[in-house]
């Protein structure tokens, strides 16, 4: 792959991102949007990547909370937070076991 560049704008102003090697190994079916996103993410600092990840996790958490509130409008407080966590970690048996143990005395 040759040199690629995209221009991005952020709070810090305009900057051009350049890469000289492939960003992601793929089967050649990366869309233009995926390629632009990968270039943008790889041009961020570690702190900026963490900020992006935190926003994405919060968006996911909010979406799950909205779904749960629609189906169980009576849930609130800790019960709602636990229901959201169960949905977020539904494929993690260890976390689910921890969530299931909440409120149980030894």
Image (cartoon, rainbow, N blue to C red):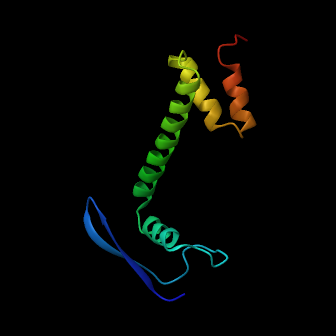
Q: Is residue 64 above or below residue 78?
A: below
Q: Is residue 59 above or below residue 35?
A: above
How far from the left and from the top, in percent, is residue 65?
Answer: 52, 31
How far from the left and from the top, in percent, is residue 46?
Answer: 44, 59
Q: Quadrant of residue 15?
A: bottom left
Q: Is residue 105 above or below residue 71?
A: above
Between residues 85 and 46, which one lies in front from this camera angle?
A: 85
Instruction: Say whether residue 29 is left or right of residue 36.
Output: right
Between residues 98 and 28, which one lies in front from this camera angle?
A: 28
The residue drawn where x is 43% and y is 68% is 40
The quadrant of the picture occupied by the C terminus is top right
The residue drawn where x is 46% and y is 87% is 3
Residue extending furthest toward the left: 13
Residue extending furthest toward the top: 105
The quadrant of the picture occupied by the N terminus is bottom right
Instruction: Say whether residue 49 is left or right of residue 93.
Output: left
Q: Is residue 103 above or below residue 33?
A: above
């Amino acid at each position: 792959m040759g040199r690629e560049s995209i221009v991005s704008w952020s709070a810090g102003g305009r900057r051009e991102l350049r890469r000289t090697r492939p960003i992601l190994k793929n089967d050649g079916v990366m869309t233009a949007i995926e390629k632009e996103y990968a270039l943008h993410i790889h041009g961020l600092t570690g702190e900026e990547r963490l900020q992006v990840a935190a926003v994405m996790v919060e968006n996911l958490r909010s979406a799950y909370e909205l779904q749960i509130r629609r189906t169980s409008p009576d849930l609130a407080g800790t019960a709602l937070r636990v229901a959201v966590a169960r949905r977020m970690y539904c494929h993690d048996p260890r976390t689910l076991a921890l969530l299931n143990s909440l409120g149980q005395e030894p």
